Image (cartoon, rainbow, N blue to C red):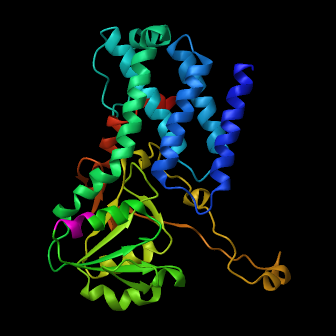
Amino acid sequence: MDSNTDIEDLKREFIFSLRRKFPRDSSSSIAIMTVNLIRKIIFRENPRTMADLQRSLTSHCKRLHASERSELIIINIGLMISKLARDEVLQKRGGREPEPLYSLWRDDDETMERLKNADMKKIRKDLQASIKELSTEIESSRDCIASQSTELLFNNDIVMVHSLATSKTMHSFLTHAVKSGRKHRVIDVVDEEEHLETAPDFVTPIELFEVASRMPETSKVVLVAAAYFPDGSCLVPAGGHQIALLAKRHCVPVYVLAPFYKLCPFFMTDPASLHSFRSNTLPFDMSANSAGHVDCLHPAFDALQSDLVTLFVSNTSCIIPSHVNRLKEDYYHSQDIADF
């Protein structure tokens, strides 16, 4: 089979696997699937130079993201692997340390020429090992975030959370605190009535309209990010914006669980373009009669401004929103961001 045909089949199978699964897979599973897909593409295309690899990654990631506009993780993983390849080339050739991400200039001509003409055969094995380490880091990110729960949650705290039933990271975060001996109450804001009956034993479920009456007794709010951006803003499940506004009104800190692979290197210029919508909640007959006359919006995410977030809880530490832009340097290269 031709390698190009094989690669197209791999991408088609990847997109179909995302669309077939309902409810959606966890973000860590999608990130690992993306890493494995890009690793297979690199192995089959066998790029000869670093320039060929970067063109390939950019082309494939753009096409995959165009098929699934709400999955920003695809672009994140592609740019992370591109930075790993750059680092391997510079390490093999004795290049200098990369410039800080916030610098306004690009790589010098000597470094650019070294990267473009680098032979991929010499670094392919090391790049495959680095990609495997990236996959391992994604798998362990949930446990790393959960281990920080004992530093943020204390005895007698009343913690309000959102989307506990759909977030494995949130569930691990709270479970680790309970297993560590923390004696606190957890209030879970659910958006569907069936979640009221399936809530864990240590959780008191409430609906969104009850948040205003329960916020005065709350000491901390914990949300989970669908994506977060360099300006300190983030996307959270729908309803999170209302909870964060009430928390700010009552001076309650808001912690957002944010694994590193959800950090998007681009600013969100148009939040509406990133909002995926859930299925219509109107009855079929009513939907058929009102088609073309009424827009029934049921967004899946809310956008939180940076001033509504107290801390982002990442894999290694807690980060204030103003320092998120500095965190990009650890995972992305400024040249890749400029060329994307």
| The quarter of the displayed image where residue 101 is located | top left
Q: Report the residue at 58% width, 15% height from top.
A: 46
Q: Is residue 339 visible?
A: yes
Q: From the viewer's perspective, is 63 left or right of 161?
A: right
> In the displayed image of the protein, which residue is found farthest to the right?
289
**98 or 240, which lies in front?**
240
Magenta segment main secondary structure? helix
> In the displayed image of the protein, which residue is found farthest to the bottom?
213
Q: Is residue 333 visible?
A: no
| The quarter of the displayed image where residue 135 is located | top left
Q: From the viewer's perspective, is 319 left or right of 336?
A: left
Q: From the viewer's perspective, is 265 left or right of 272?
A: left
Task: Work out whether 53 lies above or below 48.
Answer: below
**269 or 164, which lies in front?**
164
At which x and y percent is residue 72? 53, 48
Range drawn in magenta: 176-180
Task: Work out whether 269 lies above or below 1.
Answer: below
Q: Report the residue at 17% width, 65% height from top.
A: 180
At which x and y percent is residue 96? 28, 15
At which x and y percent is residue 278? 63, 69
Residue 58 magenta-highlighted: no
